[in-house]
Image (cartoon, rainbow, N blue to C red):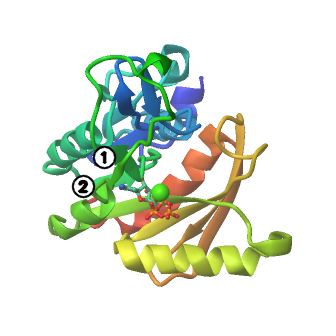
Amino acid sequence: ALALLAPRDLEGLRIAISAGGTREPIDPVRYLGNRSSGRQGVALAAEAAARGAEVTLVAANVAGDVLAPAQHPSVRIRHVGTAAELGQAMAEAAASADAIVMAAAVADYRPVEVSPRKLTKEAGGIPAIELAENEDIVAGLVRARRDGQLIVGFAAETPGTEGDQEELLARARRKQQRKGVDLLVVNEVGWERGFEAVENAVIVLAPDGAVAATASGSKREVAAGILDVLRPLWTGSRG
Ligand code: CTP
Ligand code: CA
């Protein structure tokens, strides 16, 4: 019944969404990773598809049960592991997308060398893992932007000293400028909020940095709120 009630206001929109968190291998059994479950990106894919969009979901290490809501005839899922793989898959998807949403948590750094064998204590000492910076994927997508293409970034920020929200928003606006994204979805995170939680609360920054909307509730409700902001910016719409 829910599907019948959903507006089909994204009919014709081709959207590429990244979800989850990348893992950068250290050796065959270890990686550098983060706590992103992929739930928010999956909810965006499910909501966009329900509203008529054609979705490519690039899923970085998203568990099968988390991915389940995105099972829809209009969602194509591509699995990736590392930031490099995610960058490649998003660049491919972006080539034919009207909108791009980078909900994935991309590792900022990767080990310079991946040990072909499991690191062992038998080697003695404590290994020093040298890191290199990963490419900023969303900034690259902005540079390669097609005419009229909309690009949405995410920012998971911990609040400033004494939970200062203005400081958090100022930092988010600087990030929006630096990356050149149209919309920035700001997510306050902490040890108990955001990443693995079922509920979420976000602030969506408009292209000029103003607060376009706030959305909270289930990750599906938050997804709907984000797409409500995106929808009127999409100029290729038939409606
Ligand atoms: N992002 C990306 N490529 C990276 C890092 C981040 O595309 N190498 C994207 C994320 O998917 C997200 C946005 O950039 O949409 C913001 O990510 P965030 O980690 O908040 O930004 P950083 O520039 O990495 O800044 P910070 O130092 O705060 O981590
Ligand atoms: Ca980062």
Taking the spot 36% from the left edge, 71% from the top edge, the residue there is 179
Taking the spot 31% from the left edge, 53% from the top edge, the residue there is 134
Give coordinates of residue 127: x percent, y percent. 45, 36
Residue 46's disc is none
Q: Do callouts 1 and 2 mark residues in contact (Cβ within 8 Å)?
A: yes
Q: Residues within 10 Å of mark 2 (few under 14, many from 20)?
A: many
Taking the spot 47% from the left edge, 84% from the top edge, the residue there is 208
Residue 15's disc is 1
Q: Earlier in the sequence, mark 1 or mark 2?
A: 1
The answer to whether 223 is drawn above or below residue 165 in the figure is above
Quadrant that contains the C terminus? bottom left
Question: Considering depth in this image, is 6 or 53 the residue closer to the camera?
Answer: 53
Quadrant that contains the N terminus? top right
**Callout 1 amino acid:** Ile
**Callout 2 amino acid:** Asp
Task: From the viewer's perspective, tell me whether residue 225 is left or right of residue 121.
Answer: right
Give coordinates of residue 162: x percent, y percent. 86, 72
Give coordinates of residue 234: x percent, y percent. 33, 63
Task: From the viewer's perspective, tell me whether residue 168 is left or right of residue 120.
Answer: right
In the picture of the structure, the residue carrying the numbered disc 2 is 98
Question: Considering depth in this image, is 232 or 101 the residue closer to the camera?
Answer: 101
In the displayed image of the protein, which residue is found farthest to the front? 124
Which quadrant of the structure image shows residue 27?
Answer: top left
Which quadrant of the structure image shows residue 142?
Answer: bottom left
How far separated are the C-alphas under marks 1 and 2?
6 Å
Taking the spot 38% from the left edge, 31% from the top edge, the residue there is 26
Give coordinates of residue 58: x percent, y percent. 33, 35
Where disc 2 sits, the SS reads: loop
| Residue 51 appearing in the image | no
Which quadrant of the structure image shows residue 24?
Answer: top left
